[in-house]
Amino acid sequence: MRDTASPRGWPLLLVMAGALAAMAGTTALFITHEHAWRYLVAAGCLVQCIGWVRHGARRGGGAR
């Protein structure tokens, strides 16, 4: 049994896409002061969270 600490496959894609979206939204929010960018930040954080949950489910639910 291989135990990996970092996500691979779809969980990795979700984690990275969520992090990039959240960072892009945060940068745009600070530059433009337009509050609509908060939705991109929230969506990015949600996608990243889903990626980590998928990674945890793949490993069997938690560290053993």
Image: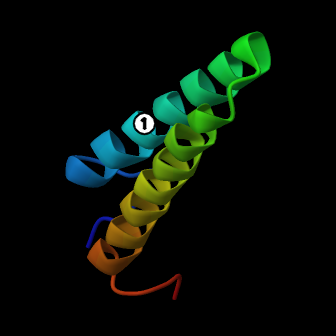
Along the viewing direction, whichever of 60 and 38 lies nearer the viewer: 38
Residue 51 vs 31, above or below: the answer is below
Which residue position is annotated with label 1?
A: 16
Camera sees residue 37 = yes
Would you say 36 lies left or right of 47 here?
right
Residue 21 vs 15, above or below: the answer is above
Along the viewing direction, whichever of 2 and 37 lies nearer the viewer: 37
Count neighbours of disc 1 (C-alpha within 10 A) and say few if under 14, some if 14 to 19, many if 20 or more: some
Would you say 24 lies left or right of 9 here?
right
Query: Residue at left 41%, top 72%?
Result: 53
Residue 23 vs 54, above or below: the answer is above
Would you say 35 lies left or right of 12 here?
right
Query: Residue at left 58%, top 28%?
Result: 25
Along the viewing direction, whichever of 14 and 26 lies nearer the viewer: 26
Label 1: element kind: helix
- Of the 4 image quadrants, the one containing the N terminus is bottom left
Number of labels in the image equals 1
Would you say 29 lies left or right of 3 here?
right
Residue placed farthest to the left in the image? Answer: 9
Query: Residue at left 48%, top 32%?
Result: 21
Q: Position of residue 58 (x, y in %)?
A: 28, 73
Q: How is the image coloured?
A: rainbow
Label 1 amino acid? Answer: Met
Along the viewing direction, whichever of 46 and 40 lies nearer the viewer: 40
Q: Position of residue 30 (x, y in %)?
A: 78, 20
Q: Position of residue 29 (x, y in %)?
A: 70, 24
